[in-house]
Image (tube, helix red, strand yellow):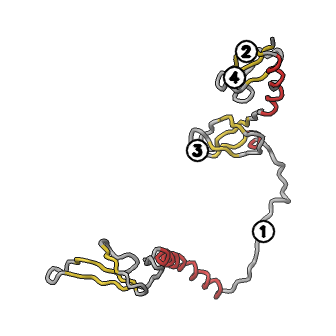
Amino acid sequence: MNIAYQCMNDSFHVFKGKNLDGVSCPICEAPVLLKTFDDQKDNALPEYKELKKQYRKKFIQSECLKCKHVQRNECNNKAIEVFVCVKCNGASIDTWVKNIKYPSNPKLKSTIAIDLGLDDKTKLKLRAIAQHTEALADELDAIDNAWKCECGSIHYEDSILKECFSEEVTSHKRECQECNKVISMLNELEGTE
């Protein structure tokens, strides 16, 4: 009769090992129970040390730049230096990386300037382009949101029926100029000004 260990959270997590007092499940880190198994089943069970190597979890301590909260993050053998703070959703960085002191070298602290050689006329053109980009974006949005018939045409003719004395609009109709389909519009006409 051999002794094996079975996870209390998942009964499929079963392993064998020697002198494993106070051990937890190497897969999910839950408490384990001692179980007896016969020799035939025991030979197929994995060893605790093998499972521990396979499911080893590594943790990194990080400190939030916003609220200074220190937390422990699981990294799963990946190089991660920035995490999300559990308290304030701020950037929490690896404390080892944070404490690295890079030697200062005054020769390396230089600025790079690039002269594009733009004349005054080109600068004025670039300013004009910058001023009109918002109007262009609005116009492109209007084209994207323009009405389109089921046949794929964007050419249409609108007709509005008003009452004689009150000038109250009673109906809107839109007719596709390609397939001649008439659509009754209850709301304001879209895509027209």
Question: Looking at this view, is 164 or 39 the one in front?
Answer: 39
Q: Earlier in the sequence, mark 2 or mark 3?
A: 2
| Label 4 SS | strand
**Residue marked by disc 1:** 112
**Which residue position is annotated with label 4?**
7
Total number of numbered discs in the rendering: 4
Q: CA distance from mark 1 to mark 2?
A: 70 Å
Q: Label 4 is placed on what type of residue?
A: Cys
Give the mark toward the camera: 3 or 1. Answer: 3
Amino acid type for the residue under numbered disc 1: Ile
- Reading the image, the residue beneath label 2 is 35
- The answer to whether 138 is drawn above or below residue 37 in the figure is below
Q: Is residue 34 left or right of residue 91?
A: right
On the image, numbered disc 3 is attached to which residue?
89
- Residue 54: horizontal and vertical position, in percent? 80, 33
Secondary structure at numbered mark 1: loop
In the depicted view, which residue is nearer to us: 190 or 3? 3
Q: Nearer the viewer, mark 3 or mark 4?
A: 4
